[in-house]
Image: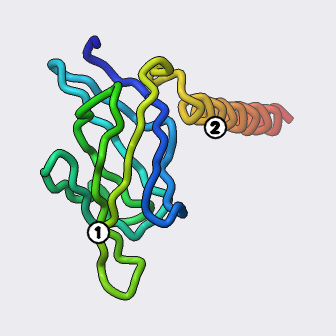
Amino acid sequence: MDDGDYAIPVSLEGGSGKASVTTPAALKVKDGTAVMTLVWGSENYDYMISGGVKYQRVNEEGYSTFEIPVTSFTQPMTVIADTTAMSVPHEVEYTLTLSPDDIMAGNQTPQAAAQRVVYMGIISVCAAVSLVKKRRLRK
C-alpha cells in the first residue's frame, strides 16, 4: 500500500455487545506501516492493548481515541480495551475486523464529504454577508 491517508471500514465484536467504534476508521500508511485511528463510541476507555503493546488515549476529552498499528488486514485483530464505565476499571477483549476491499482515500469518506459541505456553507454565508454589506454601503 502506498504511503498516504485512507479510511477503512471496521467492525467490532466482543464485550457486552454495547460498545461501538466509528467506521470507517482513519488509516495512515507511512514507510509500509499502517496505523489506524480507532474512535470508540464512549469516553470511558483509558488504554488499549494490541499485539501485547499498551496504547494510551491520544485525546483527553470526548470519545476515547487511540492510534494502533494494523497487525492484519485479512485476519481479525484481537485487542483489549480498559473501560472505566464500571465500578472499577475492567479490561475487555474485543475483535476488530477490517474490510480491506473497501479502503478509500481519506478525502472520500462520508466524514470528509460532510466537512466539505460545512465549509461550503460557511463560505456561502460569508459571501452573502459581504454582499449585504456592499449593498448597504452603496445606499
Residue positioned 76% across, 31% down in the render: 131
Viewer-nearest residue: 136 or 62: 62
Alpha carbons under labels 1 and 2: distance apart: 38 Å
- Amino acid on which the number 1 mark rests in the picture: Glu
Place of residue 77 in the rendered image (x, y in percent of width and height, measured from the top left):
31, 41
Residue positioned 52% across, 61% down in the render: 17
Q: In this view, does 125 lie above or below 78?
A: above
Mark 1 — residue? Answer: 91
Residue positioned 35% across, 31% down in the render: 27
Viewer-nearest residue: 5 or 90: 90
The local secondary structure at tag 2 comes to helix
Q: In this view, does 86 lie above or below 11?
A: below
Q: Which of marks 1 and 2 is in front?
A: 1
Residue 117 lies left or right of residue 94; in this view the side is: right
Place of residue 45 in the rendered image (x, y in percent of width and height, measured from the top left):
35, 66
Place of residue 58 in the rendered image (x, y in percent of width and height, measured from the top left):
27, 54
Instruction: Rate crowding at label 1 as few (under 14), some (14 to 19) or many (20 or more) other CA atoms within 10 Å.
Output: some
Mark 2 — residue? Answer: 118
Toward the top, the furthest residue is 2
Residue positioned 42% across, 22% down in the render: 100
The local secondary structure at tag 1 comes to strand
Displayed quadrant of residue 137:
top right
| Count of numbered badges drawn on the protein | 2
Residue 101 lies left or right of residue 49; in this view the side is: right
Q: How is the image coloured?
A: rainbow
Viewer-nearest residue: 59 or 135: 59
- Amino acid on which the number 2 mark rests in the picture: Val
Place of residue 75 in the rendered image (x, y in percent of width and height, measured from the top left):
33, 31
* Quadrant where the image shows the N terminus: top left
* Quadrant where the image shows the C terminus: top right
The numbered mark, 1 or 2, whose residue comes first in the sequence reads 1
